[in-house]
Amino acid sequence: MSNMCLYMAPGSCSTAANIILEEVEEVFEVAVINIPAGENRRPEYLAINPRGTIPSLRLRDGSVLTDLVAIAEWLGRNCRRGRYWPGHPALQKRAQMIMRHVTEVVHGQGFARVFVPEAFACDPREAAQVMEEGRRIAGQALAEAARMLDVEAYALGAFSVVDPILFYVEFWADMKSIPLPVRLLDHYRLMLKRDAVYRVLREEGYNPARLGLAPAHESGALRKNDNVPP
Ligand SMILES: N[C@@H](CCC(=O)N[C@@H](CS)C(=O)NCC(=O)O)C(=O)O
């Protein structure tokens, strides 16, 4: 059996999968897919992931996971004796809810418009407007995400695979100067202190010392005694 292989692009949502693989201390290979050069639409990659998206994770038995949430849950459940996947069914449900909100709404509805406005605009002249709309949607969805988290520290209290998923959109918000709610800025800074996060950011070409410096956006913040959904 061969090592796992992560198909990724530096600075993309695959950063979350890269961090999780480091956190669970798996030995894995990396295949960099150059999206601007169209490598994700070539037959070789479409044979691995017919949707042409990254990340994809080839497991040791040769099967492939082609969705970030599925990758996170699989690694959480199956590596390091499941220590980064919550044991309680209510927390598992919350983990799913937060990860889906991040990938489908914050990323899929918000940041996708910021990074690939042409996918949402019929007329190229509308690109600037679509990007602005994307920033607004991302900001609002990040405020909603802040309200889904445990009040302190990591998303579910203890560190789990949910945290790197949340991290990648916090990182994008930082890159794009979209202010983070206080709760997310605290979470982002906490994540930046983790060894695995530091290593992955360096490997992907970023300087962690320059990140997390922007001030927080107050609305959407959670205080210690606010209600948290079960
Ligand atoms: N829901 C998918 C979305 C992945 C996604 O959109 N990845 C982007 C990079 S961040 C991508 O592959 N873009 C290239 C394309 O869609 O052609 C997942 O969670 O894996």
Image (cartoon, grey):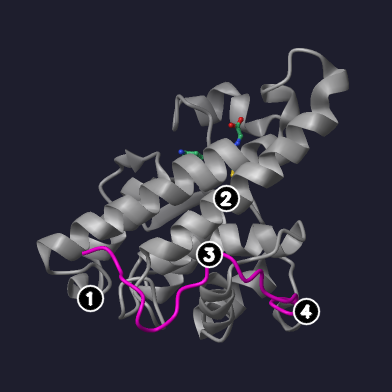
Q: Residue at x 29, y 40 (%)?
A: 63
Point out which mark residue 140 bears: 2
Q: Earlier in the sequence, mark 4 or mark 2?
A: 2
Apparent side of residue 174 relative to residue 3 in the rendered image (left or right): right
In the picture as drawn, the residue positioned furthest to the top comes out as 122
Query: How far apart are the alpha carbons under marks 1 and 3?
Result: 30 Å
Point out which mark residue 220 bears: 3
Q: Which residues are magenta?
A: 211-230
Q: Is residue 41 above or below residue 71?
A: above
Given this view, does label 1 or label 4 mark the residue nearer the observer? 4
* Label 4 sits on residue: 210
Question: Looking at the picture, which amino acid does disc 3 mark?
Answer: Gly
Of residues 156 and 146, the one nearer the viewer is 146
Question: Looking at the picture, which amino acid does disc 4 mark?
Answer: Arg
* Label 1 sits on residue: 83
Q: Residue at x 67, y 59 (%)?
A: 173
Residue 27 location (% of width, % of height): 40, 69
Q: Is mark 2 within 8 Å of ligand 1?
A: no
Secondary structure mostly seen in magenta is: loop
Apparent side of residue 212 relative to residue 151 in the rendered image (left or right): right
In the picture as drawn, the residue positioned furthest to the right comes out as 125
